[in-house]
Image (cartoon, rainbow, N blue to C red):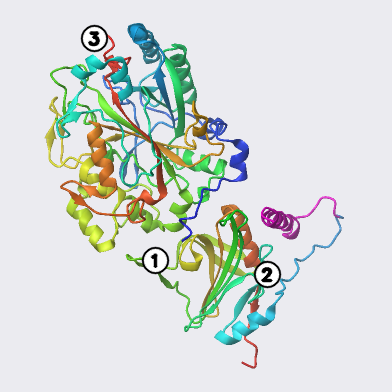
């Protein structure tokens, strides 16, 4: 079986450019900054962006993600006794960014997410009192990251104090933000992770396709011209993304804020890096098999369609997934996930917002990357010399446990103790056969008002 | 030996692409008559004629294969020489680099013929959950060389798995040539090689006596 002995081949062009230099291409390839709608006041949630454009593709409403993304992970660089000063310093820098840029793809999106090591080392007492609890899991809403059935044994479970997600259509905005945050000297940076998404919704060759070709990624030639992501399908269908404040701690009642408003309008963030074997995807799966794997077995779509309906009427139940499995021996990535990522009944949020059955809960912010696995790291082993196709996967859920349920569903472990057993990364297990997760960590995203060193003032 | 073959093959191909495909050097005399590409020449026709006689249908001898492969049936690189009951045939030529203990490089070309059928045959995926699938799928346009208009298929099965494959019809039969997408070749190199292979096919008909 050629698949098993296959290793990623990176061509001579990629070797010559090198992993760290490739992003100089991004701005050149991205072209002019797209026009975005004007935006108003910044939302209290850090994880929400204003001014996200909606387009129609193949009859489906699609949210257009920012073109450029960067994640900065870091350790806190000050002593506990200096935490209040650090809080003030960082907030001043962030406040200036707020003043100068709209919280939108046209401006700048900055999201600070704090890891368990920060809470346990720097603010243990306040954390014990204020960290939200997950009612279903019977524990903290913020759990240590774990490996899943389809993860390699070597998946690194990280322990960063903080991860900062920075998004914009303009690369210089991101560089400006990183420079100002770095200048506060409150963090010791542990890694930088870069990437891109979209660019093809207006019919032009998309950024992932251009970047893949520019560095001669194996399989690059087979990526559809306008594909939002390397794998050839749109992933930001409006109906497939959690609407509004649905992923907030307080919205669905999954999370107990413990009588405090401190983390109201906050959420949970999972961050992982996953490699993608594009050549295996495009050489071993024909189009229908790619549809079967990415969505659900035997789903009929227009030939070579990139955007597929993912509305409430298209949602699969456990029974649907089981029936597909018994008929085809396979499960689809989206179908399996939908058993945990979609609302099982109509729900009304605390502000009166009605979320109909079938609504998506997680809000994804993932983007493609050529990092191998990171653009820069304090660990030299985490900076590969050659570009590699992958995704920096970011998703906002109400809790760690909620994310873990989603991720288990991806492996065939469905609600109600329904287990569809596959060998790790089996070809019939959705996308898993071509994915390898290298790193994982869970984070808590405070509301904007408490984004800087949360709980330090208490 | 490890690096020499692939490098030699790549440079040889590049040289052929530059000098043998109608490209003209500025140092050549302006008045020189255009040079016709040499007619492809099957180096070992006897084996191909025997194959054509055996299946009672024309076969294609690959007059160009990447170095060190040759078109010799039952020669050192011809690892599969197979004819099925339906008269379809598979001729496989492979070179593998095993210097590092595993297979670190491979040149692998398959030629197939299905006399009497022009539709894409069916294959099974194998294993406990085996499914019936077309042997060649995901068409990606056509390539025309030497009067043969072939369709490029990128998802192929069995001996052609992880190969890029060209398929065309001739005299009521379906024919294919495919090449493994594996180091030292990337996608574009395989496409270049397939074009060269298609351009240099020599049609061998059954001998009149059969």
**Residue A85 visible in the current orientation:** yes
Secondary structure found at label 1: loop
Report the residue at 21% width, 31% height from top: A246
Q: Which residue is mark 1?
A: B125
Residue A458: mark: 3
Precedes in sequence: disc 2 or disc 1:
2
**Residue A40 visible in the current orientation:** no
| Separation of marks 1 and 3 at Cα, in angstroms | 62 Å
Residue A333 as seen in the image, left or right of residue A351: right
Magenta residues, as a range? B1-28
Secondary structure found at label 3: loop
Residue A13 as seen in the image, left or right of residue A252: right
Q: Which residue is mark 2?
A: B70
Marked residue chain, label 3: A
Report the residue at 27% width, 22% height from top: A45
Secondary structure found at label 2: loop
Q: Closest to the observer: A28 or A153?
A: A153
Dot in front, 2 or 3? 3
């Amino acid at each position: 079986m050629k698949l098993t002995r296959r290793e990623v081949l990176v061509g001579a062009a990629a070797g010559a450019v090198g992993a760290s230099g490739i992003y100089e291409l991004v701005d050149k390839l991205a072209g002019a900054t797209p026009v975005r709608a004007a935006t108003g006041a910044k939302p209290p949630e850090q994880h929400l962006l204003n001014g996200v454009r909606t387009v129609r593709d193949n009859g489906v409403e699609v949210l257009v993600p920012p073109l450029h993304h960067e994640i900065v992970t870091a350790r806190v660089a000050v002593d506990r006794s200096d935490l209040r000063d650090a809080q003030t310093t960082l907030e001043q820098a962030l406040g200036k960014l707020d003043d100068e840029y709209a919280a939108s793809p046209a401006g700048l999106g900055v999201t600070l997410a704090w890891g368990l090591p920060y809470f346990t080392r720097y603010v243990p007492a306040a954390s014990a009192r204020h960290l939200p609890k997950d009612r279903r899991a019977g524990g903290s809403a913020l759990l240590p990251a774990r490996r899943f059935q389809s993860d390699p044994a070597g998946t690194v479970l990280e322990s960063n104090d903080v991860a900062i997600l920075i998004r914009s259509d303009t690369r210089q905005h991101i560089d400006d933000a990183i420079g100002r945050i770095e200048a506060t000297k409150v963090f010791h940076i542990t890694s930088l992770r870069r990437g891109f998404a979209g660019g093809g919704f207006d019919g032009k060759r998309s950024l992932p396709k251009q970047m893949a070709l520019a560095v001669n990624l194996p399989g690059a030639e087979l990526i559809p011209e306008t594909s939002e992501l390397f794998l050839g399908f749109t992933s930001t269908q409006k109906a497939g993304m959690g609407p509004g404040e649905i992923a907030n701690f307080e919205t669905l009642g999954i999370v107990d804020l413990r009588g405090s408003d401190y983390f109201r309008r906050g959420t949970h963030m999972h961050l992982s890096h996953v490699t993608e074997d594009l050549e295996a995807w495009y050489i071993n799966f024909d189009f229908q098999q790619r549809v079967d794997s990415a969505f659900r077995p035997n789903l009929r779509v227009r030939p070579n369609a990139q955007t597929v309906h993912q509305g409430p009427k298209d949602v699969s139940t456990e029974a649907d997934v089981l029936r597909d499995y018994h008929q085809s021996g396979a499960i689809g990535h989206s179908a399996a996930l939908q058993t945990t990522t979609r609302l099982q009944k109509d729900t009304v949020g605390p502000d009166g917002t009605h979320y109909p059955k079938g609504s998506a809960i997680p809000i994804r912010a993932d983007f493609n990357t050529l990092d191998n696995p990171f653009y820069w790291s304090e660990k030299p082993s985490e900076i590969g010399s050659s570009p590699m196709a992958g995704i920096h996967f970011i998703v906002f859920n109400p809790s760690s446990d909620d994310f873990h349920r989603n991720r288990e569903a991806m492996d065939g472990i469905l609600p109600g103790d329904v287990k569809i057993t596959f060998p790790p990364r089996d070809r019939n297990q959705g996308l898993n056969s071509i994915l390898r997760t290298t790193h994982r960590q869970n984070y808590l995203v405070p509301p904007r008002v408490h984004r800087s060193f949360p709980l330090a003032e208490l | 030996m490890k690096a020499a073959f692939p490098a030699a093959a790549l440079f040889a191909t590049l040289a052929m692409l530059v000098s043998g495909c109608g490209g003209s050097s500025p140092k050549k005399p302006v008045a020189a008559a255009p040079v016709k590409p040499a007619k492809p020449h099957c180096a070992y026709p006897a084996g191909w004629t025997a194959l054509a006689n055996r299946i009672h249908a024309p076969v294609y001898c690959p007059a160009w294969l990447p170095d060190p492969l040759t078109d010799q049936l039952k020669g050192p690189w011809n690892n599969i020489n197979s004819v099925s009951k339906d008269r379809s045939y598979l001729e496989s030529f492979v070179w593998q680099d095993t210097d590092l203990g595993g297979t670190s490089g491979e040149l692998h070309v398959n030629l197939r013929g299905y006399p009497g059928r022009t539709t894409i045959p069916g294959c099974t995926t194998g294993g406990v959950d085996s499914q019936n699938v077309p042997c060649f799928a995901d068409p990606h346009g056509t390539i025309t060389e030497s009067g043969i208009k072939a369709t490029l298929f990128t998802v192929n099965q069995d001996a052609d798995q992880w190969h890029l494959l060209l398929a065309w019809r001739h005299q009521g039969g379906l024919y294919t040539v495919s090449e493994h997408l594996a180091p030292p070749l990337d996608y574009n190199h395989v496409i270049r090689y397939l074009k060269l292979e298609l351009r240099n096919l020599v049609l061998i008909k059954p001998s009149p006596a059969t």
